[in-house]
Amino acid sequence: MKDRKNNSMSLKIKQISYDLAVSFSKGEPHLIHKKKFVYHGLYVDDVLVSIMAYDINKQKAKLHSFYTPKEFRGRGYFSDLFRFMIKTLKDKTDVKYMLVDCLDDSKGIVERFGFELLREKQFKHFKVYYFRKDIT
């Protein structure tokens, strides 16, 4: 894969729909719950490098289930995808605000995009941060 700064890379975002959500705790996938989710994936030269799910309920959008494989982290791919999702939801839906729940590794990025921390919850092995951003 070429360096991100090299303009010869092909970047594209595709919408993907699944009927279930899977978590990769400790590297092993397991089913969280079965529900219709819409994902957007960022592809570089046809390789999926970052993914994010969302669902919309009336005027609220919830962004969740972020994942970027370790070998693609630190290159701005998730930021590109996150920026795209915010713009798309703002421009093409009636959503008035967005909610995000994330773990430590995404917290800084979410804050940089102007989301306000509402609360955090400590679980046995990890902490979840809950954010909100008005987009009207």
Image (tube, rainbow, N blue to C red):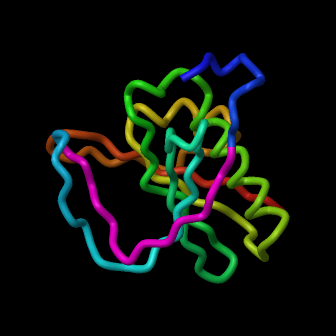
Name the chief secondary structure element in magenta.
Answer: strand
Residue 58, picture quadrant: bottom right
Q: Residue at x 38, y 41 (%)?
A: 103
Up-down relation of residue 44 to residue 135 (above or below): above
Left-right relation of 104 to 27? right
Q: Is residue 16 magenta?
A: yes
Up-down relation of residue 91 to residue 25 (above or below): below
* Numbered label tally: 0
Q: Residue at x 78, y 54 (%)?
A: 87
The one nearer the camera, 34 or 62, is 34
The one nearer the camera, 31 or 119, is 31
Q: Is residue 19 magenta?
A: yes
Residue 67, picture quadrant: top left
Q: Position of residue 4 (x, y in %)?
A: 65, 21
| Image quarter (top left, top right, bottom left or bottom right) of the N terminus | top right
Up-down relation of residue 17 to residue 48 (above or below): below
Q: Residue at x 68, y 38 (%)?
A: 80
Q: Residue at x 59, y 80 (%)?
A: 57
Q: Position of residue 131 (x, y in %)?
A: 55, 50
Q: Position of residue 66 (x, y in %)?
A: 46, 48
Left-right relation of 63 to 68? right
Span colored in magenta: 12-25
